[in-house]
Image (tube, rainbow, N blue to C red):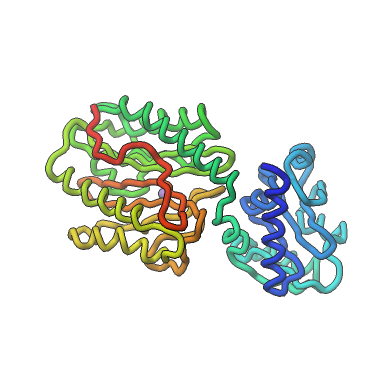
Amino acid sequence: MSASIFQRRQNKLKSELADRGLDGMLITNLTNVRYLSGFTGSAGTCLFTPRGQFFISDGRYREQSKEEVRGFTRYIDTGTHLRIAAENELIPGELKLGFEGDFVSVNQFQQMRELFPTVQWESTSRLVEEIAAVKDPAELEAIKTAVEITDRVFGEVLPRLKAGVTEKEAAIEFALRFRRYGDGEAYPPIVASGPNGALPHAVPTDRPFQKGDFVVIDAAAKYGGYHSDLTRTPVIGEASGKHREIYEIVQAAQQAACDAAKAGMSCKDLDSVTRDYITEHGYDKYYVHSTGHGLGLEIHTIPRLSQKSREVLKENYVVTIEPGIYLPGWGGVRIEDDVVIGKDGCEILNRTTKELMVLG
Ligand code: GLY
Ligand code: MN
């Protein structure tokens, strides 16, 4: 990504800090460090002050950070990043600085107060996340590529699934291909057959698929650091009337939300679209999670599409739409797409069919 993208992000944060009367900010969450600076390593801190923008890491990342980090003066040393900041007098005088209250530990906070006794520290929440929720064109491209890889892999693996294949064997086929074509899995693949499908986040087991199993497959690729997220629920061998009934309810609820999603809509209202439909059909008790979540450098990020959410959809948010019905002892159905929110509607990125697939 070009230097100007990072500069735009940094400027957005600085204008947000100015609006809040803050002189700067300490960024310790690695995803946010990556978003603001371009650094992809496992240890880095960003510091915005009136004196400048500083990036702190250790010797392992001397060369990598030189290549990646945009718009920050780098300090590479051993010891905690806070101590490096103090030793180099990066935070002078009596400043009012923000920090990420959601991610700083009690011990780190104590160290902040000890090392910088004249700084007035102010806890903030989701400052960078809210900027990052609106995707820029390069991010949309990365997510679209991740989705394309995911669709390709579903196209390759689904035809191989039949009675006798185990959940673990199927999960490995997905994971292998995500690594071959992209950066790897966006999250450990979920392959949950028959009764195991009633657990929305089941871990793949040695259970072989049997005729009449629904198989919840929630598996997706990552590309350029960006996540996709896809769920389809094929049935093995043949579909009964009950399979079709449950599937059609979830499919219609999912489609209704895809049809309704657009900028300006509240996330709570979008959740109500799937929830009301499933409730009208008598299965509300078995719809045990929210409608979806934001996607980006993290698999789950803001906004949350739930009854508790107070967020409103904005143009170029990327969210999942993934209602499900889970019947204990019998199985589950979830159908999930990734969509880009637009002014008048949403763009569904996935191409894998949502019609009921009977495999094997
Ligand atoms: N794909 C996992 C989840 O959205 O929870
Ligand atoms: Mn999801």
Q: Nearer the viewer, residue 27 or 149?
A: 149
Left or right, 59 with respect to 187, comes to right
Left or right, 180 with respect to 63, comes to left
Residue 342: give x, y in percent of width and height: 46, 54
Q: Residue at x 81, y 49 (%)?
A: 74
Residue 218: give x, y in percent of width and height: 38, 42
Residue extending farthest to the front is: 344
Residue 147 visible in rendering = yes
- Hey, which quadrant is residue 278 in on the image? bottom left
The answer to whether 169 is drawn above or below residue 107 in the figure is above
Quarter containing the C terminus:
top left
Q: Nearer the viewer, residue 288 or 336?
A: 336
The answer to whether 296 is drawn above or below residue 67 in the figure is below
Q: Residue at x 46, y 35 (%)?
A: 148
Q: Residue at x 13, y 40 (%)?
A: 240
Q: Residue at x 74, y 45 (%)?
A: 69
Left or right, 141 with respect to 309, comes to right
Residue 48: give x, y in percent of width and height: 76, 61
Residue 41 visible in rendering = no
Residue 63: give x, y in percent of width and height: 78, 37
The answer to whether 334 is drawn above or below residue 99 in the figure is above
